[in-house]
Image (tube, rainbow, N blue to C red):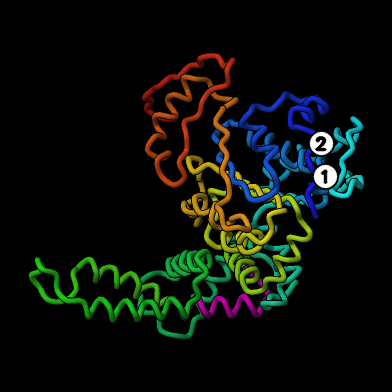
Amino acid sequence: MTPPRPRYSPAELAGALGLFPPTDEQAAVIAAPPGPLVVIAGAGAGKTETMAARVVWLIANGYAEPGQVLGLTFTRKAAGQLLRRVRSRLARLAGVGLSAQGAAGAPVDTEGAPTVSTYHAFAGSLLRDYGLLLPVEPDTRLLSETELWQLAFDVVNTYPGELRTDKTPAAVTSMVLRLRGQLAEHLVDTGQLRDTHLELERLIHSLPAGPYQRDRGPSQWLLRLLATQTERAELVPLLDALDERMRAVKVMDFGMQMASAARLAATFPQVGEDLRSRYRVVLLDEYQDTGHAQRIALSTLFGGGVDDGLALTAVGDPIQSIYGWRGASATNLPRFTTDFPRSDGTPAPMCELRTSWRNPPRALRLANAMSAEARRRSVAVHALRPRPDAPPGTVRCALLPDV
């Protein structure tokens, strides 16, 4: 089916809805044709407003209906803000009499409700709808961090096997949960961990001595590396016991939830087919903070160049990444263009929002200078610039004895 030609420009829609006209860089994002797109949006660059305007533009021009919109972000607050903006603009769109028409000229229903949720809530909905394919029981309950710690502590305390450690049960529990989270985030199971440990041990003890090495055998650095891996491998029985207990009582944690969703998407292509037929507009917010499991789930469901008519837009800024401690991968944003290519194999296009609307020039000069090194890593990010009428602003520096 031939996609509809745009009837309204971003400026026309903004005028009809009583909003400020978009800048050229915002208009380029708003009116980008359907297909994959990554937007590098700096701090204060109007990201949420631009994404809401893009949804309205796509609906007004007949590319999708409101019920075919899926937006994903990290917090319920951010999801609520995006949903409110989209709904308010769609309500205005219906009120000003602008008619949306699809490819065949039929009117588009602008009364439906977009779906906007957190990434983890989306993973949970996947498991509820399709989890039996793995299988994961639909009534599996999500544990809080406190409940998970209590359950893991009980598993450690009641473990009948031998634990070669002088650490307290609480310390061992923390080690188990930390390792469990890392394995889930990288989609590694305990069998792979055990096999990797054995392979690493054989490799280290079979390496020839280095040219400047006095003593034969592995170096101290390699032995410390092996000791760390050995400590992890010794936790495998506890990890397996915890997994068995969680399956028995039908519970999972956030890491297990996302890892299960990624395996579901990668193993059963029909899940992606169903979602792509249900959603024709997909927004991925704060993409720089997604982890490996999220990347696998999203790229399998919506990427791979299988549907150029899907308007998939990811928004991120590597300078603003805040969830590295929680497993966010710095490589996800630069990989987006190849994880979500066009059907002919060409990488997804990239746009930038560089004008910072809330920061004065003096603050931006300081911020750009401090972030210069970070902007050279990952995706190439240009320096932010102030809005044309921004006052100079004031930057103060102080050394205080306390906060």
Judge whether residue 34 can be spotted in this image: yes
> What residue type is disc 1 on?
Gly
Q: Name the residue under label 1.
A: 62
From which residue to which does the magenta span run?
238-252
Q: Mark 2 points at which residue?
A: 7
Residue in view at x 64 percent, y 32 percent? 26
Q: Is residue 318 inside the magenta stretch?
A: no
Rendered image: mark on residue 207: none
Q: Residue 387's spot in the image, x, y percent?
A: 58, 21
Q: Residue 329's spot in the image, x, y percent?
A: 48, 55
Q: Is residue 102 left or right of residue 194?
A: right
Which corner quadrant of the image does residue 257 belong to?
Answer: bottom right
Q: Which of 95 and 37 is in front in this view?
A: 37
Badge 2 vs badge 1, beta-carbon distance below 8 Å: yes
> What residue type is disc 2 on?
Arg
Q: In this view, does 210 lie above or below 64?
A: below
Judge whether residue 113 can be spotted in this image: no
Which corner quadrant of the image does residue 25 belong to?
Answer: top right
Q: Is residue 91 left or right of residue 211?
A: right
Label 2 packing within 10 angstroms: few (<14), some (14-19), many (20+): some
Residue at disc 1, secondary structure: loop
Q: Residue 292's spot in the image, x, y percent?
A: 52, 60
Q: Residue 344's spot in the image, x, y percent?
A: 60, 57
Residue in view at x 35 percent, y 81 percent? 198
